[in-house]
Every structure is written in C-alpha cells, then in structure tokens.
Amino acid sequence: MRLFASATGLLAILSVLNTATAAPTNSGFEISWEEAYAKAEKLVSGWTLEQKVNVGTGSGNEQGPCEGNTIASPGFPALCMNDGPTGLRRAYNSSQFVAGINCGASFDRELTRQRGAYMAQEFRDKGVNVMLGPGMNMLRVPRGGRNWEFAGEDPYLAAAVSEELIHGIQSEGVIATTKHLIGNEQEENRYDVDTIMDDKTLHEMYLIPFYHSIEAGSGAVMCSYNKVNGTYACDSDNLMNNILKDQLDFKGFVMSDWWATHSTVNGINSGLDMTMPGDANADSVTGGGLWFGKNLTDAVERGDVSEDRVTDMATRIVAAWYKVYIDYPELRFNYFDSDVHADLNVQRNHKENIRAQGAASVVLLKNEDNILPLKQDSINKLAIIGSDAGPDPEGLNKCQDGSCSRGTLTQGWGSGSCYLPYLVTPLDGITDRADDSIEITSTLDDWDLENAAKIAADADIAFVFAKSDSGEMYIVVDDNPGDRNNLTLWYNGENLIKAVADANDNTVVVIHSVGPIDMSSWIDHPNIKAIVWPGLPGQETGNSLADVLFGDYNPSGRLPYTIAKDINDYVADVSPDLEVEYTEGVYIGYRHFDKYNIEPLYEFGYGLSYTTFEFDKLNVKVNKKKTEKVTATLATASLFVENTGHLDGNEIVQAYIVYPESADQPPKQLRGFEKVFVEAGKKKKVNFEFTVRDLSIWDVVQQKWVVPSGEFTLLAGHTSLDIRQKATFTV
Ligand SMILES: *[C@@H]1O[C@H](CO)[C@@H](O)[C@H](O)[C@H]1NC(C)=O
Ligand SMILES: *[C@@H]1O[C@H](CO)[C@@H](O)[C@H](O)[C@H]1NC(C)=O
Ligand SMILES: *[C@@H]1O[C@H](CO)[C@@H](O)[C@H](O)[C@H]1NC(C)=O
Ligand SMILES: *[C@@H]1O[C@H](CO)[C@@H](O)[C@H](O)[C@H]1NC(C)=O
C-alpha cells in the first residue's frame, strides 16, 4: 500500500493534464485547408512576382534572428524557423523535453501530444513560427546517428507519434515540419548518398509516417539531403509532386533541408516551395547556391518556371500560416547571439510533462526477485556508480549542440538537441526520493574499477550507470562521426558493469542510450538483477527514473526497436557506399527477425511491469460497406484487459496484423496500440480501429492501396512475441 501512496498524487496530476489534452487543443482556432486557402489566395493575389518569390526565399544563414528566416511581403511576416525535435534549439530558459525515441518508447499518445503542445508554447512565446520537426525517419540501421530523434523501427508507431506531435504543435499556432523526405537513415555521406528503394518499400515502410502527418494537417514537409533513386530529394518531381502533393494530397509547403536545394528551375518545377537557409554557404559540401530570390524571378521572366507555380508556392506557405494562425507575440529570440532574450522564461509547467513522459518511457528489461520497486524498509545503503548518473564535469550546455557526453545522457547531439535549463541527475533524483534513513554512496568515475567495486560491495543494492551516444555528422564526439562507431557501451561501461556486478549480487544496471546496444558480454552475469532502460529523458531524467525505481510510477515503457542477441542479426548497417540499396525491402527491425525466426534478446514492444495483465475475449468486426477512402474504418476490434497483479498499472496492448498468405507480407505488423490504465484486480475494455490503409498493401502496378483477399489474423500482444489472443477475419 505504501508503495503507491504518492502514485495517486502523480496520477491525479496526469489525469488533469490528460483531460486538458484529450481533445485536440486546436479546436479553438486551427482552420481547415479550404478556409486557409481562401484567405491565402486573397492575400497572394495582391502580390507582385517578387513578393510571391520572397515568402519562399530564405534571407540567408546567420542573418538572424532564427536558424531560417523568410523575407516578408505585404500583410505577411518574415517567418522564423528553428529546430528542433527536443526543444527550442539554442534558447535559454526553455525546456529540454524527452527525445523522440522516448515518445516511441512511451507508446503514449496523450503525453506525446502534450509534449508537442508544450514545446510549441515555448516556440510561440519566443516568437518562433515554424518548428523544424517532428523527424520521422526509420531506425533501419542501429548505428544511425539521428535515430534518437525519431520514433524507432516501426512505421505505424512513428506515424502515431508524428500525428500526435503535429496536433499538439499546431494547436499552439506553430507550423510543424515533418522531416526528412526521405531515405535519410544514416549520417555517413548524407549529402551525396543515393538511397535506392523500391516503390512498395517506400509506401509501406518509409512513407507511412508522412501519410499520417499530412492527415494530421502538417503545414510543412522538409525534403532531405540525400538522393533517392539517383535524384536529390529536393529536386525530385516523383517525390514532391507525384507522391507528396498528388498521392498524399499534401496542401502545405515543401522546405529544403539546410542547403539541400540543388537547382532553381528543376527544384521549383519539381515541387519545392521554400529554400533554406537562402545563402551559398561557402563551406557547404552540398554546394548550395542562391537558388530562389532573384534567380527565381529571372527564371519566371525567362519562361522556365510558370508564374502559376510561384503563385501556388506562395499560396501554400501563406495557407499553412493561416491554418494555425493565432495572435503571435513579437520575436523575442536570437539564435545567433546566444539568445539575447535569454531571461525570457518560457518553461511554464512543462517539466510536469517531461517528468511524466520520462517515467512513462522507462523500459524495464529485467527484474529478478522483484528487486524493483525498491523496498525502502529493508535498505540501509544504496550505491550509485558511473559518470552517467551525474552532471557533466564541464557544466551545463558547455559543448556545441549537445555534444558534451561526460555526464548523464539526456539527449543526443546535433541540430536536434537543445540546451538544458537545469538538470536533475539520476544521482539527485534518487537521493531526493530515498528515505532519509537510507545512505547513498557514489562514485562517478568509470575507470577506477577497484573503487567502484569497493563502493558496490558495501551497499545493499548497487546501481551502475552507462551510456551510448550518437548525433549529427557535423560534430565528432569521441571519434564517433554522428553514426555510432560501435554498439557497445561508451567509455569503460562494460568493465564498470562487470566490476560492480562481481562485487554485489543485487546489481541494477541503468543504460541511457540512443538505440540498441550490444549486451552480450555482461547480460548473463548472475548478479545483475534488474536492467532499466530510460532512453534519453531530458531535463527531469533523475526524477522520472526515481518515479519508476521507487514505484511511484509502475513501468509501462516498451522498446521501440529490437535488441539483438548478436549484433550481426540486424538486417542492415551504416554503409560507406555512395549507393545504398534497401535490399531488405520492408523487412527491417522485428519484421526481419520474425521472417527468419531469429530470437532477439529483447523484442520490439518488450517491457516489464510491476503487475501482470491478462487479455480476454478478442473480437473483430468487419465493416461490410464498400469504400475507396483509405482512411475509412474497415474493421474494429475489442478485448478485455485484466490486471491480475496487486498493483495498479498501465498495459500497452499491441495489435499486430497477419495478412493473408497470398499477400506476401511480413509475418506480423503493428497496426494499433492502446495504453490502458487498469486498477489491480479490475478489467477494462480496449477498442481498436483499422483503416482501409492499415489492412492494405501498396499495389505497385495500379499505384494504389489494395486490400488483399483471404483470411487476416489479428494478434493482441503484450509484446511483439508475447501474443496473448488471436482472432481471424476476412474483409
Ligand atoms: C526507384 O526505382 C525503382 C526501380 O526502378 C522503382 O521501382 C521505384 O519506384 C523508384 N523509387 C522511387 C522513390 O522513385
Ligand atoms: C543565382 O544562382 C547562382 C548559382 O547558385 C549563383 O551563383 C548566383 O549568385 C545566383 N544569383 C542570384 C542573384 O541569386
Ligand atoms: C533565465 O532567466 C532569468 C530571469 O528570468 C535570468 O536571471 C537568467 O539569467 C536566465 N538564464 C540564462 C541562462 O540566461
Ligand atoms: C565504442 O565506442 C565508444 C565511444 O567512442 C568507446 O568509448 C568504446 O570504447 C568503443 N568500444 C569498443 C569495443 O571499441
């Protein structure tokens, strides 16, 4: 009973927060595309050619005040765009949220939507119009540097995260940018690499998050640096015009990644609407030029680009702005001048979301003898060991773009990083939460194994912390060029874990990691009783970890990727070649492990709870009414979830679809999930809906989504391998 005394408090806060975001918060003012277009067409019709060109033209990098700025036209402001996916980049007194990969691990739509809304409030409070996120590339290669910004290896999970973030972001008047279109799955050679994938793979895997983002109303899409099938993404008529604007019916604007524009005439005729940042960046390997601006006006005057295309370009940008427009404060931010408005504190109550989602995204991988939650009455001394438990010795925000890695890891590095307004380290969080009667001893030195062992031996329970970091290619950290050099722990992590486990038979391992790691050298150590996997939890890391360790939050996080027994089991790795063909097709992550019956160490969707759940009465109903609309509901399902343990908790019910055999699809594919809170001893009904697209395959000949005929199976899983209920149906 004592265990959940304060859980009620936390849950009460959560339920208040959740009520506040249960309905889209944008209902007040976000208008439809039709209304937005009507307004935009009216404004743009009064503009000269040059004024239309200006709204799609970047004013130049470091021309401030934001990372990207457009040029104003009558009745329309110079838009300010800024990274990024974890918080307002290079701003002070603003929050560092959990990373994108933690949104995936939380399997929590409400906290994810709230994260988007809260982050956007900070952008708006500082006057920033466009958020350069969310990022929705896939975790295809575990070493990929930016995986931590995205939501893992499953396109449906990434789509769910993306759509919630977009609803949240745009509900606060900020334009969301879905990125990067497409095939930007590794950092190595990213400016030149040619990603080759077939049409089925493109649609069924990599485009799925974009479909959902566009249906959620995303105002902008960013084209990526790389080539796709031999053409630069920002020059690709097939990607931007055919797929994005025609097939996906995208009404907003396509923005280039920074210096990813490669032409004037071809780019704009292929569907590019905005070039960023709008200068020739002397040292850029992409060879950026001043592609829009006067070059574009000249191209129209020469007849190489039609004025209609420029009108459409301007209308798309203005419509995206009207769609989410609310009264905007003046710009109070300067990215290039260390944020001259640093004292403008925009954090509000946002740490509540960060702490709650930090706790909700902790994945408990192992918990023998129920060592967790901690039973404080029987503990006299806890040892906390490893640099990953403490502050960075250099101080807060002292290295470029999150590249400090000597303290606890709260985010990866690169443009997707942001400053920490403060940091609650794991050591602080555990110390604050532990009863006064418990003595905490610690060492943050990863290399003095003798001392670590001594401190561990002397405690009832020893916590050992380690990490694995990655980031964007323009910064090298400990010789890692963005993509990780290896999947083993950083610094002396493996030896530290072994030294601690040798010394204490109640060892708890805590890993902060950007993605999967190789655990093979220590996973079987008999003294490791628990493994805790908090991902990259942002500024409240210590508090959210303590919430789980002490039982204030019953863990419900699930792996958004597969952790292999042997790292050679993954289907693909970062490639040094300039042509990277996705030969595995749609078989990335668990789809590959399932296909070849490879047993992972921890499967996709895996995570333990302090209670137990049972599923019952899975039932599927098929909607017999014929429809061509891919977003229409084709089948619904329900089942009961019973909490059969002694503690209240959240279950993540995972719905996997097995296609008819003739469809030649992966053995199973996630098509739904629900996070459901069930009190101990109680039952709750959970419902699912599957759209036409959820049950379709992409027909490359007909170029459309087609529901295959034959028998489908719905699997209701606790994880992707622990399937608890099955039901078959035909549509
Ligand atoms: C890439 O080329 C393949 C083979 O020609 C084709 O099937 C596929 O549709 C192309 N993909 C894109 C994105 O254009
Ligand atoms: C037009 O583009 C070319 C190629 O990048 C560049 O050298 C030139 O400066 C641009 N001119 C203007 C006026 O933007
Ligand atoms: C944050 O704002 C406060 C005032 O609200 C100011 O004193 C402090 O210096 C600011 N922090 C930074 C890092 O600028
Ligand atoms: C893996 O990379 C990390 C970070 O650079 C490094 O600390 C570690 O020693 C490397 N591991 C191996 C086995 O080389």
Image (tube, rainbow, N blue to C red):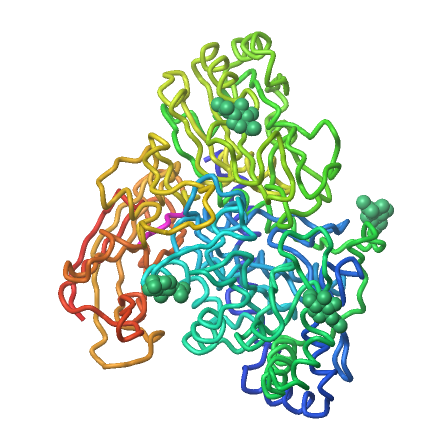
Q: Quadrant of the N terminus?
A: top left
Q: Is residue 666 above or below residue 486?
A: below
Q: Is residue 314 above or below residue 187?
A: below
In the rendered image, residue 214, in percent from the top left (x then y), is placed at 48, 71
Q: Main secondary structure of the magenta part?
A: strand
In the rendered image, residue 598, in percent from the top left (x then y), is placed at 25, 37
Residue 503 belongs to the span the image colors magenta: no
Q: Nearer the viewer, residue 593 or 461?
A: 593
- Quadrant housing residue 594: top left
Q: Residue at x 23, y 81 (%)?
A: 625
Residue extending farthest front = 302
Q: Is residue 689 left or right of residue 416?
A: left
- Quadrant housing residue 37: bottom right
- Quadrant housing residue 611: top left
Part of the protein shown in magenta: 650-654
Q: Is residue 393 above or below residue 160?
A: above
Q: Is residue 195 visible?
A: yes
Q: Is residue 172 left or right of residue 604?
A: right
Q: How many marks?
A: 0
Residue 652 belongs to the span the image colors magenta: yes
Q: Is residue 466 visible?
A: no
Q: Residue at x 25, y 58 (%)?
A: 657
